[in-house]
Each structure stands twice: as structure tokens, then as C-alpha cells.
Image (spheres, rainbow, N blue to C red):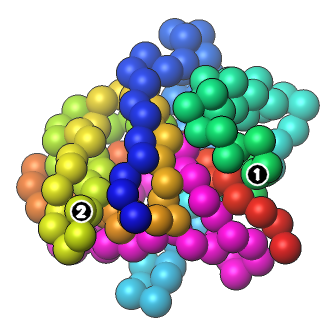
């Protein structure tokens, strides 16, 4: 299936962005692994009264371009740290924690060097074709279940990068 993606720069207001970035070094991260081994560190988050504004904002901005969102709910969210200098890890986000299906991902670049290879790459057929470089406060929304994608850090200059990832699908 083909890539369906929307990118919004300066996604959060300055005040919202500062709240999120100041929080990144106050939270604890746990190792994130898949069948290929360790791929980063995550801090899982649930929606609460305090952070509802963040989830509401994502939904309000991206739902109009993705009508299927009406039938989906947020199934997983985390702050993520990635520093993968040695390899790339093409994958689709089909299910999270084995509990539910996932259809769309919102990935928001929060803190890192603004380098192309700190970003995310998308495959067309079997070719790594489309790069979305790292820019602080850049948000993207895409059909992560349908299209292979990878962190690009293993392919060029990169730094540790912090992101917010929110997944939408159906809980089963
Ligand atoms: Fe992914």
C-alpha cells in the first residue's frame, strides 16, 4: 500500500513545546526491544487530565486529513529516545504489545540535532525512497501499518533524538 503522510512544522506552540522538552530529562526510560534486539528507550504514557491537551491537539490537527480516524482510538503512546548509529530497522507498526491493531502513527520530533539522518525514512516497494529529516517540533502523521519505515540514524550523521509517538488503531 502507498504512503499516506501529512507533515506539520511548528506543531506545538512555544509554551507547549517547552513543557514537553523540559520534561524529557525528568522521566525514566525503559529499553524497547523487538525481534532484532534493542532499538531504543521508551517512556510509556497514558492519557491523563494533565496531558489531554497534547492528545487533543494531535487529533484535532490530523483527523480531518485521515477520515478513518473516526473509528479508531489511541492505543499506545510513548516518549522515545533513539540513538541507533549502526543499523536501520525497516518495519511496519502492525500491532503494539500484541494486544491491538495499529493503523496510524503520529511521530513528533522533540529534541535532537536537525539532521536529515536523524529523521525517518519510508519505503516505496523495496526501496528506501522518502526521507523526512529531523526538525525540532515537526509532527508527522502516517499509515505506519501499511508502509515500511525506519529511523535513518544508521545511514549518516546523527545524534540522540527524542520523539513523541502516538499510535491509533483498534483495541481487541
Ligand atoms: Fe514504526
- Determine which quarter of the picture holds residue 101: bottom right
The residues tagged by marks 2 and 1 sit, at their Cα atoms, a distance apart of 25 Å
In the rendered image, residue 99 lying in the magenta stretch gets the answer yes
Q: Residues within 10 Å of mark 1 (few under 14, many from 20)?
A: some
User: What residue is shown at x 67% (from left), y 53% (from top)?
Assistant: 168
The answer to whether 13 is drawn above or below residue 124 in the figure is above
Residue 83 seen: no
The answer to whether 138 is drawn above or below residue 12 in the figure is below
Q: Which mark is residue 72?
A: 1
**Which residues lie in the magenta part?**
81-107
Q: Which mark is residue 124?
A: 2
Q: Secondary structure at mark 1?
A: loop
In the rendered image, residue 100 lying in the magenta stretch gets the answer yes
Precedes in sequence: disc 2 or disc 1: 1
Q: Position of residue 165 (x, y in %)?
A: 56, 49
Quadrant (top left, top right, bottom left, bottom right) of the N terminus: bottom left
The answer to whether 47 is drawn above or below residue 167 in the figure is above
Quadrant (top left, top right, bottom left, bottom right) of the C terminus: bottom right
Q: Position of residue 83 (x, y in %)?
A: 31, 59
Label 2 C-beta lies within 8 Å of the nearest ligand 1 atom = no
User: What residue is shown at x 43% (from left), y 24% (from top)?
Assistant: 8
Whether label 2 touches label 1, CB < 8 Å: no
Amino acid at each position: 500500500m502507498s504512503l499516506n503522510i501529512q507533515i506539520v512544522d511548528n506543531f506545538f506552540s512555544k509554551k507547549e513545546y517547552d513543557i514537553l522538552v523540559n520534561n524529557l530529562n525528568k522521566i525514566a526510560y525503559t529499553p524497547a526491544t523487538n525481534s532484532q534486539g534493542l532499538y531504543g528507550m521508551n517512556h510509556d504514557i497514558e492519557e491523563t487530565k494533565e496531558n489531554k491537551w497534547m492528545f487533543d491537539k494531535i487529533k484535532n490537527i490530523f483527523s480531518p486529513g485521515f477520515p478513518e480516524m473516526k473509528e479508531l482510538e489511541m492505543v499506545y503512546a510513548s516518549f522515545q529516545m533513539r540513538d541507533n548509529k549502526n543499523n536501520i530497522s525497516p518495519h511496519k507498526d502492525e500491532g503494539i504489545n500484541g494486544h491491538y491493531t495499529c493503523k496510524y502513527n503520529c511521530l513528533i520530533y522533540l529534541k535532537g540535532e536537525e539532521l536529515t539522518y536523524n529523521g525517518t525514512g519510508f519505503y516505496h516497494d523495496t526501496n528506501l525512497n522518502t526521507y523526512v529529516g529531523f526538525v525540532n517540533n515537526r509532527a508527522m502523521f502516517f499509515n505506519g501499518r501499511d508502509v515500511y519505515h525506519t529511523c535513518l540514524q544508521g545511514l549518516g550523521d546523527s545524534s540522540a533524538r527524542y520523539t513523541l509517538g502516538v499510535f491509533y488503531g483498534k483495541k481487541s
